[in-house]
Image (cartoon, grey):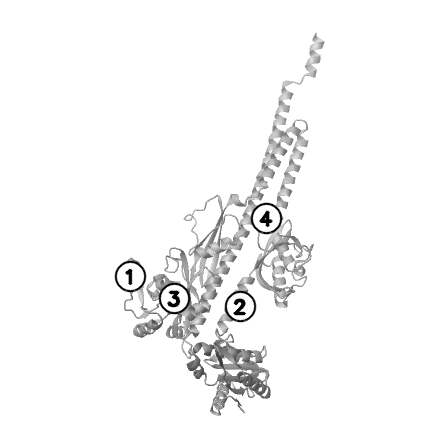
Amino acid sequence: MTTGTSVRAASDPRPGELGRATILIAAICLMVLAAIGFSVAEIRIKILEQAEAGFRLDAHVEVSDVAADLTAAASAAETAGRFSATAEGINPIGFSGFLGGITVQYPWIAAIEWVPRIDHAQRRSFVDVARHVLPGYQIREVGDAGKLVSAKSRPVYFPVTVVEPLSLESRVVGVDLGTVAEIRNVLDGASESGELRASDIISGTREVGKSDAVMLASPVYNDVPVGGLAPAVWRRQNLRGFALAVIDLKRVLDHATAQSPGVGLALKLMSKAPQPGVDAVDPSLFVVTSQVTMGGRQYWLTIEAPRVAYLPSSIIYWLALGAAILVIAVVLVAGVSARSVLKRSLVIRRLHLEMAAAAAFSRDILDTLREPVVIIDSRARIITTNRAWNDWRRLAGAADGQGDGAYLQLIVRDGLMITRTHELALTTAVDAVLHGVEDDRECDIKLVDGQGEEFWFTIRIRAFRHGSERHALVAHTDISRLKRAEHELRQLAITDGLTQVANRRHFDERIQEEVDRSQRYGRPLVLLMLDIDHFKKVNDTYGHPAGDAVLRGVADVCRASTRTLDLVARFGGEEFAMLLPETDIPGALQLAERIREEIAALPVSYGRHTIRVTASIGLAATQNGDRGSDQLIKAADEMLYAAKQGGRNRVTCAT
């Protein structure tokens, strides 16, 4: 019996060994659970980082859209200022006709107004003149209970005189803006600086009601020489008034949100920066605050979005994978050694970290952006692109399968052309970021496809590190619409609205440039001055609309007879000017005679009438560089007067 007992004791594990094994297995399980928990936590951090990166890219798009809309409004205010500087008298219909297209194209511009400066001594005469165009007009101010009453006597008034749209006339015309403190500050700032100025955010204006608004003031001055006056004194003495643009901020933010690819974005524009500890931040939201500058003033744009809206659906996959790994690890722990379990847990942890790092470069995040985006390596070779880039490449005529390659070569391949200046700017920006000179850089470039269509882009390049290499994210924001709008506004500012040839303002700029070029290089330059004979008789006999038809017909003849490099302009009334670079006197005489004959043979149809007119033309040329622009105009005008005195319908040339 002693022997049997000893055998059983040797085959059974001792209580101490069993306890140590149990403790070892429990320790291994805890280590595995800790490793898996660590991996899941890091995956969660990576997912949140990806979500925040997606939100920040969407927020960047929003900031760009809001900045573009505010820039368009500033351009509209400056265009209104240029129109008001050349307009004569009070003309609500002309003001609305010239600027109506701008308020339709940019609906967030609630109103464009002309606000003259009226001294107290001018008040009665100004009101009398205004009432011929605007019956019942008077200068008013906001009295008790918000009612409009006749303005009190003061040294200077700033009354709204004309407004686009015309539907706002009854609410704003006649209101003296100098009595509104927030607006008066903007007017003073604009007049003192001579530049466009913007107001703080104002609530409850008469143009937009309860919505928040910003006023843009563009100063307009009398066209008189500065002389020996200091600039500040000249501006104070020659201030003519202001062109005002009223921006409805709700419409600006709604327009930007409507175009956004983001989810649940909320935008707010403020005059002051958010104060830490005062403006509390909800931890369930992503929040970005950016500065936007307009009219010499800074605003703060806050963009918010729920964090949950940017979490990718793949989080369910990661949670399920983590649970499966946990079950497998528990099963393996029961049959493997502590070393094997620890090794497997480390392998699993490393695998999860590599998968999380690869997910940071996932195309799924890039595909949520509406801007074409590429990621390039340290040698400027494309690593990955988003769907918007590939779609744009196809629209630009690129062949399929050309999504990879050298970025600087690929962007101008397949018929896309770029100027040397823009190519150098882009190359310099990419090199500066990839070589560590700067962390981010941006530049504007223009590309032209095979059909001649222009694509304008703001290219933003931002560096980041991937492992030991420096990479960059390149985003392409399409600003083609903004560039076209700027071109259209420029054309409106330099074109005569009736005849569609250049206006007097543009002619004055060009003749100085051409005279300087003629004197510098010794090249010929001729100026033709043309006046329609007995034009007043046409107006008196058939009416002013018939006279307008004659002016358009004569302008068409002049434009069709001249070259692209020549300039045809309406000099004033029924008088036209034609600037002919690289043309000598004999050539100019032949052209003038041809124009005179074609005008004499031109039948202008108006209603049941056929109107015929003739024209007198005077010529003058630069002479060995001794004639400036004023002398050239005077000489041509004297020849025109000689043609008139000689019987009209003839060409006279200065010898």
Q: CA distance from mark 3 to mark 1?
A: 21 Å
Whichever of callouts 1 and 2 sits on the residue coming sooner in the sequence is: 1
Disc on res. 487: 2
Circle 4 crowding by C-alpha within 10 Å: few under 14, some 14–19, many from 20:
some
Q: Secondary structure at mark 4?
A: helix
Q: For residue 187, which numbered disc appears in the image?
A: 3
Task: Report the Cα–Cα distance between label 2 and label 3.
Answer: 28 Å
- Which secondary structure, mark 1? loop
Residue type at tag 1: Gly
- Which-is-in-front pick, marks 2 and 3? 2
Q: Position of residue 537 (x, y in %)?
A: 43, 84
Distance in Å between CA atoms under marks 4 and 1: 56 Å
The circle on residue 143 is 1
- Rendering coords of residue 61 (x, y %): 53, 55
Q: Which residue is mark 4?
A: 365
| Amino acid marked by disc 2 | His
Say which of marks 3 and 1 sits in front: 1
**Is the Cβ of the residue at disc 2 closer than 8 Å to that at disc 3?**
no
Looking at the rendering, which quadrant does residue 119 occupy?
Answer: bottom left
Residue 116 in the image: above or below residue 306: below
Mark 3 residue type: Leu
**Is disc 4 in contact with disc 2, using a CB cutoff of under 8 Å?**
no
**How packed is label 3: few (under 14 Cα within 10 Å), some, or many (20 or more)?**
many
Helix, strand or loop status at disc 3: helix
How far from the left and from the top, in percent, is residue 114?
Answer: 39, 68
Q: Which corner quadrant of the image does residue 203 belong to?
A: bottom left
- Is residue 508 among the parts visible in the rendering? no
Please identify the quadrant where the C terminus is shown.
Answer: bottom right
Counting residues from the start of the chain, the first of labels 4 and 1 encountered is 1
Around disc 1, counting alpha carbons within 10 Å, would you say few (fewer than 14), some (14 to 19), or many (20 or more)? Answer: few
The answer to whether residue 523 is above or below residue 32 is below
